[in-house]
């Protein structure tokens, strides 16, 4: 009976991880959409190619230029974009860690299942 409780706890843990993974992925998607709009704003204010704005170094360079020219609106937009980029990176790392832990649990469960032999179901006598 104790074995059933352990299996239930693992299933509940896995279910909660799956729910957490879905929530994190949805949050990442929403944040990415907001970041896209922020990139449009930075691109129009800074008159730079939008495709280069995913690089933190480019954002830093634009920040320096906006600071030197005292262009407060662009500076604010760049700071928001940098913050959002950091948040998206953190979310990506969290999703990767969660997926890795789920994979490790699945591997451990499979290995345990392979080692657990039902001796009564074997067609021959065991020692």
Image (tube, grey):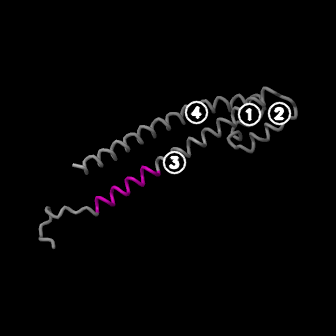
| 75 versus 97 height, above or below | above
The kind of secondary structure element at disc 4 is helix
Q: Residues within 10 Å of mark 2 (few under 14, many from 20)?
A: some
What whole-number distance in Å separates the C-alpha atoms at marks 1 and 3? 27 Å
Sequence-first tag of 2 and 1: 2
Residue position marked by numbered label 3 in the rendering: 96
Sequence-first tag of 2 and 3: 2
Residue 13 position in % (x across, y down): 38, 43
| 89 versus 71 height, above or below | below
Q: Residues within 10 Å of mark 3 (few under 14, many from 20)?
A: few
What whole-number distance in Å separates the C-alpha atoms at marks 2 and 3? 35 Å
Residue 74 position in % (x across, y down): 78, 29
Q: Which mark is residue 66?
A: 2
Q: Are marks 2 and 3 in contact (CB under 8 Å)?
A: no
- Quadrant including the C terminus: bottom left
Question: Closer to the observer: label 2 or label 3?
Answer: 3
| 23 versus 124 height, above or below | above
Q: Residue at x 37, y 41 (%)?
A: 15
Q: Does 103 lie within the magenta span?
A: yes
Q: Main SS of the magenta segment? A: helix
Say which quarter of the image contains residue 123. Answer: bottom left
Q: Are marks 2 and 1 in contact (CB under 8 Å)?
A: yes
38 or 47, which is in the foreground? 38
Sequence-first tag of 2 and 4: 4
Sequence-first tag of 4 and 3: 4
Q: Which mark is residue 31?
A: 4
| 69 versus 91 height, above or below | above
Say which quarter of the image contains residue 116. Answer: bottom left
- Extent of the magenta region: 100-114
């Amino acid at each position: 009976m104790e074995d059933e409780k352990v299996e239930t706890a693992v299933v509940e843990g896995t279910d909660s991880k799956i729910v957490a993974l879905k929530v994190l992925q949805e949050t990442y998607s929403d944040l990415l959409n907001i970041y896209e709009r922020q990139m449009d704003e930075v691109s129009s204010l800074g008159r730079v190619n939008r495709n280069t704005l995913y690089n933190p170094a480019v954002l830093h360079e634009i920040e320096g230029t906006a600071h030197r020219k005292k262009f407060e609106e662009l500076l604010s937009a760049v700071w928001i974009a940098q913050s959002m980029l950091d948040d998206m990176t953190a979310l990506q790392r969290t999703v990767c860690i969660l997926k890795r832990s789920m994979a490790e649990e699945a591997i451990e469960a499979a290995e345990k299942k392979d080692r657990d032999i039902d001796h009564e179901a074997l067609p021959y006598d065991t020692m």
